Every structure is written in C-alpha cells, then in structure tokens.
C-alpha cells in the first residue's frame, strides 16, 4: 500500500476502536503491546485510550499486520512521523473537546449521539437536549429523528458492529477493495458511524470529563483524514509536528488561550468554497411542454456538475474525498494544504479556477460559472471557534468575486464574452431554452433533449456509474454527458445490477447506489460481473437524490405525468402548485451558531445532518406519502423546489416544516433553532413554469420578511400563499377553519348543507375589515390601527350574518365566530376562505 493511502486509511479508522470496544468484545493484544501504545495515567494507575487497541485489532483483521494497523495502534503514543501526524490531525479535528456541567454521565456505550442542533447559539442543558438512536444510515422513518434522552446497551453496538463487519467482508469480493478503494471506506464508515458519538463523558477517581457527545464518529474520522493528508502533502517535518504536539499538550492541560499563540506560524491550510452561479436562470427559464422532465434533468445535472467540479479540483490537488468537507445545494467546501513540495497550492487553486472558467465559457457560454473563494489559516484556527469565522470569511470572499465573474479570463476571451454570439438574420431558437440555434421552428436542441432524458433515467435507475476518464482539451457538446466529460468524469445510469455488463470498461469507477445503502444486496447482485475482471478497479458508494416522480401508472412501463396530469389530480379547481422553501439564516448558523465550540468536526456534523434531511429523508417521505402527486425537482443543501397538485403542495409544505422542526429542535418544550420559510404559487397549468418559479420565489422572500407582533419573537419562519403570509405557528388554525368550512358546505349535517354563499359573505367581511383599517390609517399610528380595527363595523356584521343561518349549524358557526373574533385571526380570514373556495369550485366551469 502507498504511504499516502495508508495515512488516509489510518486516519479514517484511527478511532474505529471506539465502535468496536463498545460492543463488549475483547481484543487480542498482549499486555506488552498495550504498554507500548497506550498512555499511562498515574491518577488512576492504569493505561488510557485503550480504544486504539481495538482500532488496531480491526485493521489487522482486515488488512493484516502492517502500517495501517500500527497507525491505529500508536496514534495516542506515537513512535514515528506517521503516528504523530495522525495524533496531531486527531487533536486539530476535535479542537478542544468542550465540556458541559450538566452532561449526562454513564458508560461510553450507554451515551447516544446528542443532536448538534442542541448546541446552536445558546446550548441546551443535557436534560433538554435531544439524542439520536444508534442506527446506520439506512431507514428514514421515526428512528431518523432525535428523541429525548435514552440509554443504549452493548447489544445495540454489537448488532450494529456485526452489520458493519458483514458489509466490509462482502466488499472483499471486489477487486481493489479494501486496500485501494478509499472512496468505499469513506461511504461504509459514513453509513455506520454517523449516529455514533465520537467522545462521551467519563470520570476518574479525581476528575470528571464531561465531554459533549455531539460530534459523530464519522465526522471526526473524515476530518481527521482530511487534515492528515494536508499535513503529509505539505511535507511537514517531524520537528514541526513535535513542536505543535508539545504546545497543544500544555494547552489542553491549562486551557489558557494565550498558549495557542505559540502556534503562530505561516498559514498551512486553505478553506476553499465553490459556489455555482447562474443556477436560477439555468433551471427556471424553461418554457415548453416537457418542462417537468427538463427541470428534473437540469436540477440533477447541477448536482452532478457541482460534484464533478469539486472532484476535478480534488484530483488536480491529489486530495481524497475526505477533503470535501461539504457538497450540496450548489456549494462545496474543500480543505486544502496551502503549499506542498510541488509548489504553492493557493496559486494552483487559482490556476484550476481559470481552467474551469475556460471550460464553462465553452460549454455553457457563461450561463453557469463556479466562483472559488479562498481563506488561508493556521493550526491555531482549529480552536476556540475560529472555524466559524473562517466559514464566514470564505463566504464573504465568494460574494465579492461574484461581482467580477470570469475576471481571470476576460482579456483572453474578450470576444467570446462581449462579441457577437451569431451571424444575425432570421434564426430558429430552441423551443425549450430559447438560447441555442436549431434548424427548424419549434425544435429542441440536443442538449435540452438530453436533460429531459436525464430526468427519465434518474427516475428509473437504481445505480449510477461514475468513471474517471482522461480530460480532453476540447469536447463537442451535444448532451449533458459531454459537459461533465470536460472535467474528467463520465456518468451512466443503470436500471439495475443485471444491466451492469453492458456498461463495462477498464477505467477506475465508482458504482453509486441511488437512495439505498444496502451494500450487501448490491455486492451479491453485481459479484458475477466482477469474476473474470481481476484488473477492474471499482469502488462502491451511495447517493441520496431526488427521485420522487409521479407516473401515470407503473414507473417502468408508463410516462411521467406532465403538469396537466398533476393538476387534474388536485381536489377542487385544477391548478398546479409550485413550492420553494429554504432554511432561514443558514449562513449565520454556520458562521456564528456554534460560537467557540465551532471545531471543524462540529461544522462537518452540522452540514452532514442538514444534507441527510434534505437529500435523504425528504425524497423517501415524498415517495411514501405523495408519490402520485408531487414532483421533487430539487432538494439539497438547505432548499428545495417542488411541483405538484396545488392542494397536496400546501399539505406537504406543512409536513416538511413540522418534520424539520422536529429534526432541529433542542427539546419538545424549547424554541427550535432552525426554521424554514416557504413560498407557494398556485397557477394554471399553461402558465409559464419559469414565471411560476419566479412568483414562488417572490413569495418565499415575502415569508423571509415576515415580522411578528411581538418584536421579541423571531421573524421569518413563515409561508406565503394565496396572497397571505402567516407564521407556521398559525397554519394549523387556518387549516382547521378551512376544513370546517369545506365539510359544512360539501357534506353538511343531518342531510342539510351549509349554503355555499357563506364563502362570499366571509370574503366581504374581510374586505370590510380591510377598508375600515385603511380609513383608520389617516389618523392613527400602526399600533392603534391594528387594535381599533378589531372593534369596527365588520364585527357586528359577522355576528348578524352567522346568526341568520340555519339552526342546524348553530354550534359549528358559533365556534367559527369565536375563532374569527379571537386574537388576530381576522387579519388572515381571507386565506382559509379562498382556500376553501378553490377546493369547492367545480373544474368544468373553469376556463383555463
């Protein structure tokens, strides 16, 4: 095994022994080995950090005796430079492990992973925090969500460990695994260690170490691997590592921040942020029939595009996947050494950015671009919350560079950017993108057709093959695949494992399971394809993608529903709903939310958690609950874009907001840390989709401007639709009012139905309220208006009208009256009334 690969694997598995040890299984090393690799603590008269023995045991079982085994064994009592690099990377990853006075104590195997959201802004005490069950990333049911505190047992760990080792041994049938398939190791550790706490509280006879169990073992392991390879590539000397370890040893004992200043030295790392620009225009300017498939294809293409560019940068810098700290939602963050024996990596990153600009100008004519922000930092910046600051600084750098896109190549490509794009005269433009010249009127260009095909392939495939290919200087762009080949990656969709043979090649490849982490099943199915191909280098991975797609009948035999089909499935009026939703203040959460606790591993845990919700849970939820009605166009990072039957879109938006609240809350009785704001456009099916997307975007912005009556209450956290913006806390009351109206008018009571005219009457009462409020504006302040408007003419008109209705509905109408007159409900009366009207209207009377 190459020394570089051994270091990466040693770092990625250095603490896997914590997982192994908590099963209660014994390790086989002698007392002499323990003495040589475990530190001795005089206070307890015993050896500590024994999990290294279990890490070494696992490495020996899988790789045999050798370098990876030794790196795992000796990372707490290092003998040589390799061991010391793992130790230093381990310490930098965890920063200092923060302690909480009220943290729950127990055996290491009893303590579950604390939700990272419990630690945002004002951290919640242990008894108010929430914890994740011990599971693999496999199911997205109730076990996906955090719960109140509970204890685990060794049996829980033993069962998970058995599944982990079964998967590892299954991989041995694939050539290249385990020694070479670093990417496979990354994903298997991610699957099984994402819900295991890296550090747990413990106590000795003289001292209690109340470490917060809020960092996942996976995120600690992957960031340790990322830091370790950066140290290796910059050829750090043993003397430099020794100096850093000595300083940090003193710092950990004394907790004196001034000691960190001794680490002051030239910056050793770069935090690189990549941001795809032009996304809105690229996705939403589709105007023709077939827009649903085209939108789906374009949004997934952007996901592949972002990953391909990130990997292109990693490949150019000879860095593994572990150094991709975050990639989702059109953004990625990479940890990079600032310089190596081959030169200054800051210059190298700028060169790569220039190469990417040239390629994107050629491929997408400047419509899409990648902005790279760079922030250099040193060893001390891994501590005392500095990683928060770095995250904010690199985002600021990206925002600055967005104003001068393609700056590096403007002089070289001036004519391409500012010159004439065609010869003029009468031309035919693509019927979909309205950008590419085609031969015939109403024809689609080959690229737009390929995006539609991509939407179809994604929905029907179980596997995705990614092949690393030689990068060509110039590629003819006819299909979406051609665009990504320019960055050295080829992608092929596979319906199922039986079809793998036809896609065979000798290139290094990764086979992604789509929306599944069932490695055992995958290996069993594809093993026959590998038997006679011992030279084949393959990795296995998985990816969560938005596959939820409504079909007319069966997904493998029938067409995807178009927008008219979706609208016809809605209740009441046939309309299309477009939902845009994203997390409020996410930039501030990453740059400020973790405060002094913002180590690189905590930031990684936070980003991993959000990605799992938007990319994993959401797709599964829609497929299970809304498969026939909702088209998941895009979901990643912190936002989403959905199209479907208008009534189901409204219902789904509330479900997502509720589940997100459940996922991110500190406790049942505590205010949630993170919130969502949404915009819902309800439109005729023939309305241009890009315009509908713009409207939904404007409504989402209105939700983000939402202010509550009490200035102390948080803003945002709202939804806007049918001309109203309401906080999510008001949604259930509005929906309940609407449900009562619909039930009384459509179903009635005692074989009698409430007259439909009540809809118009309530609408007039709301208009009267609005008119009286406008009159009051002429002579009163805003606060006085809202108060006085409650006691105007509309009140007695409401009471008078409802009293005149049939005695059969007296109780129900009295309840509705109380709701309207209570609090501020009158301000939004228009919303449930219009909502009910759309549900009750007959479509045959509509002229679309």
Image (cartoon, grey):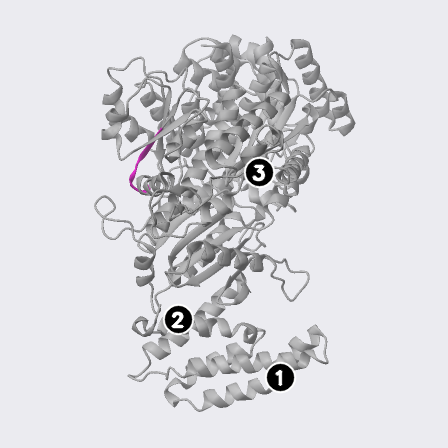
Residue beneath disc 1? 791
Pointer 1 or 3: first along the chain? 3
Q: CA distance from mark 3 to mark 2?
A: 49 Å
Pointer 3 or 2: first along the chain? 3
Q: Which mark is residue 418?
A: 3
Front-most of 558 and 217? 558
What is the total number of numbered labels drawn onto the structure image? 3
Say which residue appears at 37% left-offset and 46% top-offset.
294
Image-quadrant location for residue 248:
top right
Residue beneath disc 2? 838
Front-most of 286 and 516? 286
Left or right: where 828 falls relative to 778: left
Magenta region: which residues? 459-465
Residue density around tag 1, few if under 14, some if 14–19, many if 20 or more, within 10 Å: few
Q: Where's residue 387, x and y in %?
A: 65, 33
Instruction: State the SS at label 1.
Output: helix
> CB atoms at circles 3 and 2 under 8 Å apart?
no
Q: CA distance from mark 1 to mark 2?
A: 30 Å
Left or right: where 581 falls relative to 204: left
Up-down: is 756 above or below 636? below
Front-most of 368 and 262? 368
Instruction: State the SS at label 3.
Output: helix
> Which residue is at the far front?
425
Residue density around tag 2, few if under 14, some if 14–19, many if 20 or more, within 10 Å: some
């Amino acid at each position: 095994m190459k020394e570089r690969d051994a270091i990466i694997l040693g770092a990625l598995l250095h603490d896997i022994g914590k997982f192994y040890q908590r099963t209660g299984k014994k390790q086989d090393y002698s007392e002499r080995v323990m003495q040589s690799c475990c530190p001795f603590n005089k206070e307890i008269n015993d050896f500590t950090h024994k999990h290294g023995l279990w890490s070494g045991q696992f490495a020996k079982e899988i790789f045999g005796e050798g370098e990876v085994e030794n790196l795992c064994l000796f990372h707490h009592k290092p003998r040589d430079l390799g061991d010391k690099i793992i130790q230093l990377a381990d310490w930098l990853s965890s920063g200092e492990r923060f302690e909480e006075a009220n943290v729950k104590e127990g055996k290491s195997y009893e303590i579950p992973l604390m939700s990272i959201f419990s630690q945002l802004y004002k951290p919640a005490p242990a008894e108010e925090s929430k914890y994740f069950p011990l599971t693999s990333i496999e199911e997205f049911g109730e076990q996906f969500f955090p719960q109140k505190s509970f204890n685990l047992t060794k049996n829980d760990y033993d069962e998970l460990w058995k599944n982990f080792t079964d998967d590892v041994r299954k991989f041995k049938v694939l050539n290249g695994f385990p020694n070479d398939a670093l990417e496979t190791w990354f994903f298997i550790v991610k699957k099984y260690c994402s819900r295991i706490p890296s550090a747990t509280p413990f106590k000795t006879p003289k001292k209690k170490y109340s470490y917060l169990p809020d960092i996942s073992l996976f995120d600690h392991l992957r960031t340790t691997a990322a830091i370790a390879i950066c140290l290796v590539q910059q050829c750090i000397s043993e003397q430099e590592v020794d100096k850093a370890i000595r300083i940090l040893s003193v710092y950990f004992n004394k907790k004196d921040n001034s000691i960190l200043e001794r680490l002051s030295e030239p910056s050793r790392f770069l935090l690189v942020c990549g941001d795809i620009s032009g996304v809105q225009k690229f996705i939403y300017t589709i105007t023709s029939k077939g827009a649903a498939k085209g939108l789906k294809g374009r949004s997934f293409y952007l996901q592949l595009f972002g990953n391909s560019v990130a990997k292109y940068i990693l490949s150019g810098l000879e860095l593994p996947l572990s150094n991709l700290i975050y990639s989702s939602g059109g953004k990625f963050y990479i940890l990079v050494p600032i310089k190596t024996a081959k030169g200054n990596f800051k210059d190298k990153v700028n060169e790569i950015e220039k190469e990417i600009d040239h390629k994107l100008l050629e491929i997408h004519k400047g419509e899409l671009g990648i902005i790279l922000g760079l922030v250099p930092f040193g060893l001390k910046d891994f501590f005392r919350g500095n990683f928060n600051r770095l995250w904010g600084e690199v985002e600021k750098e990206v925002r600055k560079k967005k104003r001068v896109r393609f700056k590096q190549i403007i002089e070289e490509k001036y004519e391409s950017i500012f010159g004439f794009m065609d010869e003029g005269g009468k031309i035919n433009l693509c019927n979909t993108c309205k950008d590419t010249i085609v031969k015939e009127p109403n024809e689609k260009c080959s690229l737009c057709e390929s995006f539609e095909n991509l939407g179809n392939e994604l929905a029907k495939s179980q596997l995705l093959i990614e092949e690393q290919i030689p990068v060509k200087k110039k590629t003819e762009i006819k299909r979406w695949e051609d665009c990504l080949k320019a960055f050295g990656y080829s992608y092929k969709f596979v319906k199922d494992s039986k079809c793998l043979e036809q896609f065979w090649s000798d290139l290094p490849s990764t086979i992604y399971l789509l929306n599944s982490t069932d490695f055992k099943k995958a290996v069993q199915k594809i093993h026959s394809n590998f038997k006679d191909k011992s030279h084949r280098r393959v990795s296995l991975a998985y990816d969560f993608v938005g596959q939820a797609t409504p079909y007319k009948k069966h997904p493998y035999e029938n067409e995807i529903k178009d927008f008219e089909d979706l609208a016809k499935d809605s209740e009441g009026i046939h309309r299309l709903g477009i939902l845009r939703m994203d997390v409020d203040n996410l930039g501030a959460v990453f740059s400020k939310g973790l405060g002094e606790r913002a180590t690189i591993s905590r930031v990684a845990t936070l980003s991993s958690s959000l990605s799992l919700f938007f990319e994993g849970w959401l797709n599964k939820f829609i497929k299970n609950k809304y498969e026939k009605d909702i088209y998941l166009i895009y979901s990643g990072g912190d936002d989403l874009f959905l199209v479907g039957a208008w009534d189901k879109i409204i219902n789904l938006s509330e479900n997502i907001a509720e589940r997100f609240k459940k996922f991110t809350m500190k406790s049942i009785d505590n205010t949630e840390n993170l919130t969502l704001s949404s915009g819902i456009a309800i439109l005729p099916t023939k309305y241009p989709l890009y315009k509908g997307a713009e409207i939904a975007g404007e409504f989402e912005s209105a939700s983000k401007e939402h202010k509550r009556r009490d200035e102390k209450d948080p803003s945002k956290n709202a939804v806007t639709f049918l001309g109203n913006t309401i906080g999510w806390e008001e949604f259930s009351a509005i929906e309940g009012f609407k449900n009562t109206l619909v039930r009384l008018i459509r179903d009635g009571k005692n074989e009698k139905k409430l007259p439909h005219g009540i809809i118009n009457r309530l609408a007039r009462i709301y208009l009267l309220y609005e008119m009286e409020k406008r009159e009051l504006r002429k002579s009163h302040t805003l606060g006085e208006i809202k108060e006085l408007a409650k006691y105007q003419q509309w009140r007695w008109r409401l009471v008078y009208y409802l009293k005149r209705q049939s005695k059969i509905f007296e109780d129900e109408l009295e309840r509705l009256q109380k709701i309207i007159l209570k609090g501020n409900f009158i301000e939004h009366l228009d919303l449930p009334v219009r909502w009910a009207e759309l549900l009750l209207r007959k479509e045959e009377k509509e002229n679309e």
